[in-house]
Amino acid sequence: MRPARTAVIVPAAGRGERLGPGAPKALRSLAGQPILVHAVRAVAAARDVDLVVVAAPDDAIEVTRSLLSGIEHDAQLIVVAGGETRQDSVARGLLALPSDVDVVLVHDAARPLVPPEVVDRVVAAVRSGAQAVIPVLAVVDTIKEVDGDGSVTRTVDRSILRAVQTPQGFRRDVLQQAHASCDAADVTDDAGLVESQGVMVSTVAGAEEAFKITRPLDLVLAEAVLARRRASDGVG
Ligand code: CTP
Ligand code: MG
């Protein structure tokens, strides 16, 4: 029997409305290449990733396949049509998984600069027995609760808060079960789904460079990060 495998589902079907008008976010250019190409290259570069399943905008499946066919990596690649919501897109990726996959990560295409070490940490934690794992960072801003008029009602204790990134990692059966039994519109990540099923979610260290490209200024930051990487590699 072949050993069980690790897959990464990359939801990439969002429109990128907060980034402003243009192509779907995952297909927009970052330092001359689509954001999705950077993201797939980053996860495929992780040590233990065997398969990458991209949930693409449903009107751009063939474009996405041809964009990704030029990337050199050892992982197998599957492109499927994404859905109306991020949760639908992940669910469609789950349906495409071969039966020998037992660990599944979900990684936003919109986090193209995730260091491969973060992916490796998440895989290692699931392989060591965790049912669900998320990469996190300390919260740097002071966080306050406000009422409907915008008046402050409370300052939250920042020391117990964490900002959550992707890739999030799961035992395949745990994530599939959560997707099958939960359809909460207000859940914004996959860990939220499994939490709602009473599954314990553990944390590993995230990385600042795993930030999500959401608004125009995030693209400026991403370009700067890539320029710094190129300078320190002595390339370009
Ligand atoms: N996503 C998806 N399918 C959807 C909606 C989102 O696959 N129907 C993906 C996005 O492509 C992105 C990730 O989920 O990689 C995180 O979502 P977000 O940052 O919100 O991206 P968008 O939905 O594209 O952006 P916006 O909300 O500004 O439109
Ligand atoms: Mg969105």
Image (spheres, rainbow, N blue to C red):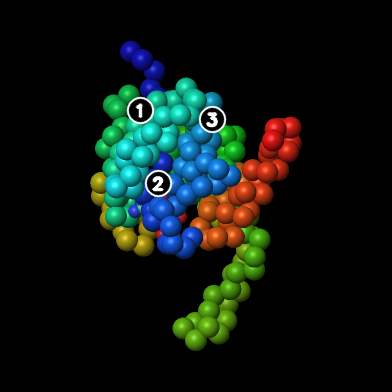
Q: Position of residue 85 (x, y in %)?
A: 32, 55
Q: Is residue 6 visible?
A: no
Residue at disc 2, secondary structure? loop
Q: Position of residue 178 (x, y in %)?
A: 31, 46
Q: Quick check: marks 1 and 3 in contact, CB under 8 Å?
A: no
Residue sitting at 62 percent across and 66 percent down? 157
Residue at disc 1, secondary structure? strand
Residue annotated with mark 3: 46
Residue at disc 3, secondary structure? loop
Q: Quick check: marks 2 and 1 in contact, CB under 8 Å?
A: no
Residue annotated with mark 1: 101
69 or 102, nearer to the observer = 69
Q: Is residue 108 above or below residue 120?
A: below
Q: Is residue 230 left or right of residue 71?
A: right
Disc 2 under 8 Å from ligand 1? The reply is: yes
Please, what is the three-letter code of the amino acid marked with disc 2? Ala
Please, what is the three-letter code of the amino acid marked with disc 1? Val
Q: CA distance from mark 2 to mark 1?
A: 21 Å
Disc 3 under 8 Å from ligand 1? The reply is: no
181 or 232, nearer to the observer = 232
Q: Where is the C terminus found, in terms of image quarters? A: top right
Residue sitting at 43 percent across and 33 percent down? 68
Which circle's residue, 2 or 3, is located before the other in the chain? 2
Residue sitting at 53 percent across and 52 percent down? 212
**Disc 2 residue crowd, few under 14, some 14–19, many 20+, Cα 10 Å:** many
Q: Is residue 232 visible?
A: yes
Q: Quick check: marks 2 and 3 in contact, CB under 8 Å?
A: no
Quadrant where ligand 1 appears: bottom left
Residue annotated with mark 2: 12
Q: CA distance from mark 1 to mark 3?
A: 16 Å
Q: In the image, which disc is placed on residue 29?
A: none
Q: Is residue 212 above or below residue 78?
A: below
